């Protein structure tokens, strides 16, 4: 499971911040992210995602995936040369 930690310490499984998806808060839960991910709350959220589907588009991953994926280097070089 991926996580997103907001500026106030709230943890969510993705960038879609809905109260229903909140896993907890690192500050209030002793900074133990591993335990939070094993919690009953986390299991409920994962089950909800499996049953209802996930509709986030993962925009936050695109740039990192492109920059750190060697398979994308030829494409990046090709686009760079066009500029």
Image (tube, helix red, strand yellow):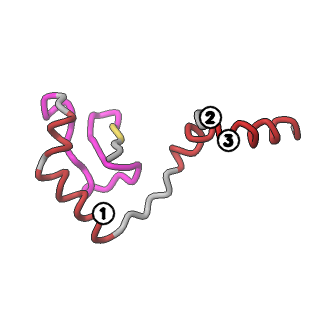
Say what secondary structure mark 1 lies in.
Answer: helix
Which numbered disc, 2 or 3, marks the residue closer to the eye? 3
Which numbered disc, 2 or 3, marks the residue that appears first in the sequence?
Answer: 2
* Magenta run includes residue 11: yes
- Using a 10 Å C-alpha cutoff, classify the residue at mark 1 as few (fewer than 14 neighbours), some (14 to 19) or many (20 or more): some
Task: Give the quarter of the image for residue 24.
Answer: top left
**Residue drawn at (35%, 44%), measured in percent from left and top?**
2
* Mark 1 to mark 2 CA distance (whole Å): 28 Å
State the quadrant of the C terminus: top right
* Magenta run includes residue 34: no
Pointer 1 residue: 49
Say what secondary structure mark 3 lies in.
Answer: helix
CB-based contact (under 8 Å), mark 3 and mark 1: no
Work out which residue is located at the far bottom of the displayed protein and give it: 52
Which numbered disc, 3 or 1, marks the residue that appears first in the sequence?
Answer: 1
Q: Main secondary structure of the magenta part?
A: loop
Position of 29 with respect to 64 (left or right) is left
CB-based contact (under 8 Å), mark 2 and mark 3: yes
Pointer 3 residue: 72
Q: Where is 69 relative to 14, above or below? A: above
- Which label is found at residue 3? none
Give the total of numbered labels: 3
Task: Give the quarter of the image for residue 68.
Answer: top right
**Residue drawn at (81%, 41%), measured in percent from left and top?**
79
Q: Position of residue 51 (x, y in %)?
A: 27, 70
> What's drawn in magenta, residue-wise?
6-30
Pointer 2 residue: 67
Q: Position of residue 10 (x, y in %)?
A: 26, 40
- Using a 10 Å C-alpha cutoff, classify the residue at mark 2 as few (fewer than 14 neighbours), some (14 to 19) or many (20 or more): few
């Amino acid at each position: 499971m991926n996580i997103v930690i907001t500026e106030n310490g709230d943890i969510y499984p993705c960038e879609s911040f809905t109260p229903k998806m909140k896993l907890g808060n690192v500050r209030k839960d002793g900074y133990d992210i591993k335990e939070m991910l094993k919690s009953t709350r986390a299991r409920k959220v994962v089950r909800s995602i499996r049953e209802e589907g996930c509709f986030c588009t993962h925009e936050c991953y695109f740039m990192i995936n492109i920059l750190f994926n060697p398979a994308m280097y030829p494409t990046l070089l090709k686009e760079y040369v066009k500029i």
